[in-house]
Image: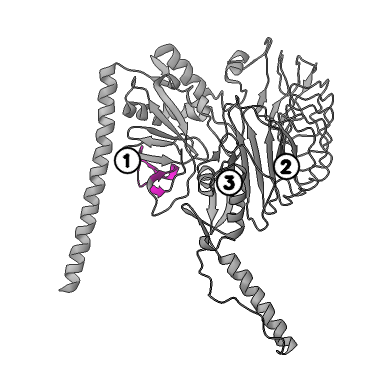
Amino acid sequence: MDQDKSLIPKPETELTSSQPSTHPVISRMTEGLLAQARQTALQQARYRVGDYELREPDYRQIRIWAEANAMEPEELLAILAGSSLEPDEDTGDEFESIHFHLQDGALLSLVWDLDRLPRFPDRWVKGLRLLALGFVAKDKGVEREEMTLLPQAPALRRLVCIYRSRFPLTKLDLMGMPLLTELICLRTQIRELDLSPVPGLTELDCRGNQLRELDFSPVPELTTLNCGGNQLRKLNLSPVPGLTELYCYENQLSELDLSPVLNLVQLRCFGNQLNELDLSPVPRLTELSCGGGLIAIIFGAKAGLGNQLSELDLSPVPGLAKLRFDKPVGYTARFSVVGLSDSVSANRLDAQCFSPEAVFYEDWLLKHANCDRLSLLLASTVKGRQQAEAETGTTDYCSIKHITGREIVGASKAYPAAGAPTARKDDLLLAITGATIGKIGIVNRYDNLVFSGDMLRLRANGSINPHYLLLTLDHHLGQVQFNRWITGSTNGHLAPRDVGRVLVPRLAPEQEEQIAALVAESLEKRQESEHLLDQAKSRVEQLIEEAVRT
C-alpha cells in the first residue's frame, strides 16, 4: 500500500497487542479489537488518483490495469471516466447504457474501451463492488490478439460486451460473477457458453457468435433470450418456462417446440430451416417475425409463406399486433385500404402504424401540399446521454421534465462525462422514449447544455427556420406522425431513423418567417411575463413584511 497516497493519516506508533503477562481472555479481546480497528482503518482509507478518491481495493485494481497498459493510473482512470456504452440503432443493439460511476471511493460501473486500452489483465483484487461492466471495440481496422475474459467481480449484475465488428474473444468464463442477471456478448468467436455459474440470469443476448449448442437448465429464471446468428441446430426451451421474448433467427433450426414457453409474447425465428411452426402453445404472442417470401396473410385463417414454411396458422394468436418478414417476393392480399407494399416500405404491419388518421394525413400531405421529409431539413440528429444531476455541476442539463411550453425551462446542473452530446441555442429537443414521446422544446434560454438519453437533438440545416419547425412538429399533424412510428409494447421508443420519416408542410419562405417570428415573440413574451410575475411576488412579500413591522 502506498503510504503517501492515503487520505487518512497514520499514527506515529503502531497498534500493538497486549503483553504476554496480560490475562488470556483480555489478551484475546484486545487482539480482536485491534484486528477490527485495522480492518476499519483499511476500509475507510482513500487514495487519490487525479481528481478521484478510491478505496484501497479499487486503487490497487486501477494500478494493475494501468501497469498492463503501460500508462499512469491517472491517465487510465481518465479514459475510463470518459468511456460509455450506448445502444446502437444501426446494429439493433438494445440495452441499458453503461457509464462510469464511482461512489464513496468504489467503482460501481465502467466501460473498457479496447480501442484505447488494448490489454485487459486477468488479475483481480478482492473487495471490488463493481455492479456493471462493459467492453466495447469499434475500430474495424485494428488487428487484435485472441482474448479470454475471466472477470472476478462477485457483486457484478450486468456484463455487456459489444463489438461493432467480429472480435477474437474465444472464451468467456462466468465463474467469478455468481450474481449476474444480464449478459450481453455480441459478435465474438466463442463456441461454448457455460451458464452454470450464473443461476440468477434473466436476460441473455449472445447473438452473432459461433455457438453450436446452449444448455438453459442452469438458468431457470431466464425471461429474455437472443441467440440469433449462431450455428444452433436444436433449442430446448423446457428449462426456461418463464421466457417471454425469444429471438433465435439465422441459425440451423429444423424444428422449434414452443410448448414449454406458454407466456411468450415476442418471437423472431426467420432464417432457419423450419418446415412448420405451431403457434397454438403461445396464445399471448403479440409480435412474430418468421421469414421471407410472404405471399399472403390472412388473420384468423392460414397464411401462405415462402421459404421452408408452406403455411402458418395464425388463429391461435388473436392478440398478434406485429407480423414482420424479410426479403418479400410478391403480394396478393390486402388489409382494408392498406396495401402490403406499404407495409413492406414501413417494415411493419400493425394497427398503430396504419391507423386511419395517420394514413389520411400522409396521403393528404403528399397529394395536396408541398412538404419535405424531416430528414432532409436537419443537419444532424444526436441522442443524448443520461447524467447524474448535481447542484454544483458545471454544465446546464435537461431532461424531458424540463420541456414546458415548447421550450427548455429550469434546467438543472450536472458534471457531464467527456464527449457527452450538447445542444445549443435554437436546437430542438424531442422526447423519444416513455409516455411523453413527441414532446418537443427549443433551446432558447441557454447557450449550451447537455441532455438526457431519452431525448433526440434536432438541428436544422439552414433550409428551415427552427421556430417554424418547432410549431409544425408540436402541432397535431406532427404528433400523429410521431405516434405512428413508436415501437415497443411496454416502454415505447421512437427510433431516430423513423423521426426522419415525418412530413413537414412547407409554405412560401416569407410566410414561414412570419410564423417563426410570432413563435419566437411568444416565447420572449412568456419569459417577460415570468419576470414580471417574480417581481410582483417579491413586491407582495415586501409589503407584507412592512405591514408586519408596523
Label 1 crowding class (10 Å Cα cut-off): few <14, some 14-19, many 20+? Answer: some
In this rendering, which labeled residue sits more in front, label 3 or label 2? 3
Report the front residue among 271 and 112: 112
| In the image, residue 400 above or below residue 92 | below
Label 3 crowding class (10 Å Cα cut-off): few <14, some 14-19, many 20+? Answer: many
Q: Secondary structure at mark 1?
A: loop
Of the two numbered discs 1 and 2 on the same chain, state the one appearing first in sequence: 2
Residue carrying label 3: 66
Q: Position of residue 222 (x, y in %)?
A: 75, 43
Residue 215 falls left or right of residue 267: right
Report the front residue among 118 and 444: 118
Residue carrying label 1: 446
Of the two numbered discs 3 and 2 on the same chain, state the one appearing first in sequence: 3
Quarter of the figure that contains the N terminus: bottom right
Can residue 185 be seen by looking at this rendering? yes
Q: Residue at x 44, y 42 (%)?
A: 400
Residue carrying label 2: 223
**In the rendered picture of this protein, how many numbered marks are placed on residues?**
3
Quarter of the figure that contains the C terminus: bottom left
Report the front residue among 148 and 329: 148
Report if the CB atoms under discs 1 and 2 are less than 8 Å apart: no
Q: Secondary structure at mark 2?
A: loop
Magenta stretch? 396-414
Tell me the amino acid under the disc marked 2.
Answer: Thr
Real-space CA distance between mark 3 and mark 2, rounded to the nearest whole angstrom: 38 Å
Q: Position of residue 517 (x, y in %)?
A: 25, 28
Tell me the amino acid under the disc marked 1.
Answer: Tyr
Q: Position of residue 507 (x, y in %)?
A: 32, 17
Q: Position of residue 382 (x, y in %)?
A: 46, 31
Q: Secondary structure at mark 3?
A: helix
Report if the CB atoms under discs 3 and 2 are less than 8 Å apart: no
